[in-house]
Amino acid sequence: MAENLIKPENLVYEKTNAMTDRVLHYCPGCGHGTAHRMLAEAIEELEIQGETIGIAPVGCSVLAYYYFDVDMTEAAHGRAPAVATGIKRVMPEKYVFTYQGDGDLAAIGTAETIHACNRGENFLIVFINNGIYGMTGGQMAPTTLENMKSTTSPRGRDIKTMGSPLKISELVAELPGTYYVARHSVHTPANVRKTKRAFKKAFQYQKDNKGTCLIEVVSNCPSNWKMTPVESNKWMEENMFPYYPLGDIKVPQ
Amino acid sequence: MAKKGDVVIQIEKCKGCEICLASCPQSVLGMSDKVNSKGFKYAVKVNSACTGCANCAVICPDAAITVYREK
Amino acid sequence: MKELRLMKGNEAFAEAAIRAGTDAYFGYPITPQSEVIEYLMAQNPEERTGMAVLQAESEIAAINMIYGAAGCGKKAMTSSSSPGISLKQEGLSYIAGAELPCVVLNVVRGGPGLGTIQPSQSDYFQAVKGGGHGDYKLIVLAPATVQETVDFVKLAFDLAFKYRNPVMILSDGIIGQMMEKVELFEQIPRSDEEYDWATQGKKPGKDHTIITSLQLKPEEQEKVNLRLQAKYREVEKNEVLYESYNTEDADYLFVAFGSCGRITQKAMEMARKKGYKVGQIRPKTLYPFPVEVINKLSDQVKGILTVEMNAGQMVEDVRLAVDGKTPVEYFGRYGGMIPSPDEILNAFEQKFIGGK
């Protein structure tokens, strides 16, 4: 043994150049970082870094604009699809994506989400669904599961008074404007690789002017679920996936 | 025989989430006794069974791992 | 070539928008300004100049589309009327905070609430004091004629890009709905200019561009505010516009803006006929407000009357400008009612001459 493998010619995996070198502010084990990296890798591999404009949301990923090494705009809470519409309509040749959490996209921004999808706006919506408001400290999200506890549903989400968890991806898949809607995760290496393939497909469809693509990433929130990262991924598999099943929801005909 | 691989972990980027440990098919990774400047224990190699499959780096939320593999 | 036409205020605004080389208009219908988007759609500006026009799902979406397009360094504009402008306040605060240029037309109607569809000036405070959350200012232009509405479109974009700040054209239901002769300026080509502050795609070897109004560290956010305040002082120094009438020998001064300024002008002429030496200032910029000229004239006149189609809003800025040097009174009608020259003259006589 003793042979030193750490040399440039042996390199098989390193951080993508489409991400900056800033240390991510996310909690340990949070799926945001991995989802960021897959999106950035998709951008780098498609060689569209200089042609891409991203929109960050309000929520835990509010500072996403520091991490993607592409031109970025920070939107008001829920308004990213409207901001993206404004960008895409004046720069139709650019690749545009929004990166939004469940509160941003499926609560306060529901109108913007649905209408952008309904118009078939030609951009990618990345939707991170971890069933909770992370940034504000663990309040109930539109996607919080039935009986799941949060700081604003301390006895668990009561369907009768708080409504059911919203399957927004299935909802927008019904709209003629959406071209490709899929649900993925970033909790195992295989799932991470699938998620990246979905992002790449979505950008390709954007290039071909096909309409709105929405990729949901079911993710974890170890801090607010009050679990270790490894436990949170297991809990996600056992509780989130049955309600939010992974896979394609709408694929090109 | 599987090719040999190696990993470089950026200690200051690691937040000790241990997801890489759970993703390594060769159980190459463990946690440090020491902590980094942010107070996190960080992932370390505990043996030389690495095959350079890059699973740990692919799953790492903090892009803290670089992977090498013999040609 | 310059062109003379008889046009409704809202339609003239829309025509001026196309001719100003606007890249994008996003709006939502609301009375009394829906003719703006109707005219734009009818004109098919995508074909005429390549300008994007889209009916958004709400005023909130529209202003955020403006935010996106403005962030790309493009000329972006929206229009609405009072209740819709209230919905846009969040977006305007973000645009001001991120220091982006845009133009917003408010064809004011009476409030509060759903109010009335009749003309009003009751959004004065909202327009000149910021309107949304945080310390910021819009540059506010107040046209009194359809012609000024047209001319202010060009001026508004010039100011918006000069200061990277949202500019509001504060019109009202009279000017929006009224038909007047208007001279249209020649088509200005749309621009492809690149700006280092705009998200137009990361250039090789350059840092990526970030547009945000967020600074988590208070010392950084204070710096942002200091920069904004310095900018507003520049605006106050450089951009004040007003019209003055008969001020040279004036014993009394009327101050009124927009359509109300025209009505007040008639009242001034009637007062002159009765032997009262009345002059008038009609602010064309409401922010920056013509503080200096009003302050100067307050040394000369025995009293100032503001006339407004609201419950007395601009009067506060006039009092600040006068700084106690001369009495300042207010007269107005509101809720969609328009004051008549007779009413104004009567109010003037009662307040200053010792009326009946």
Image: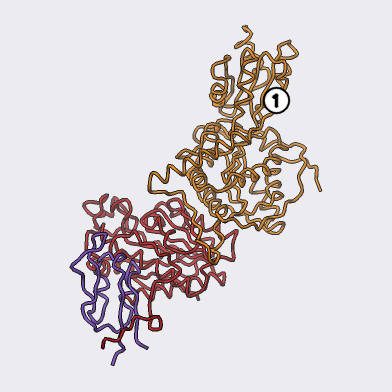
- Left or right placement of residue A241 versus residue C314 in this view: left
Find disc 1 in the rendering and name its residue: C244
Please tell me in which quadrant of the rendered image residue A132 appears: bottom left
- Which chain comes out orange in the rendered image? C
Q: Secondary structure at mark 1?
A: strand
Residue C331 higher or lower than C97, as above or below: above
How many C-alpha atoms fall within 10 Å of the one at disc 1: few (<14), some, or many (≥20)? Answer: some
Q: Residue at x 51, y 68 (%)?
A: A49
- Left or right placement of residue C193 versus residue C85 in this view: right
Please state which of residues C321 and C154 is positioned toward the viewer in this rendering: C321
Residue A235 higher or lower than C93, as above or below: below
Residue B53: percent from left, percent from top: 32, 82
- Which chain comes out red in the rendered image? A
Residue C70 higher or lower than A197, as above or below: above
- For the residue marked with disc 1, what is the amino acid? Ser
Residue C254: percent from left, percent from top: 65, 20
- Left or right placement of residue C345 versus residue A215 in this view: right
Q: Residue at x 34, y 58 (%)?
A: A25
**Residue A12 visible in the picture:** yes
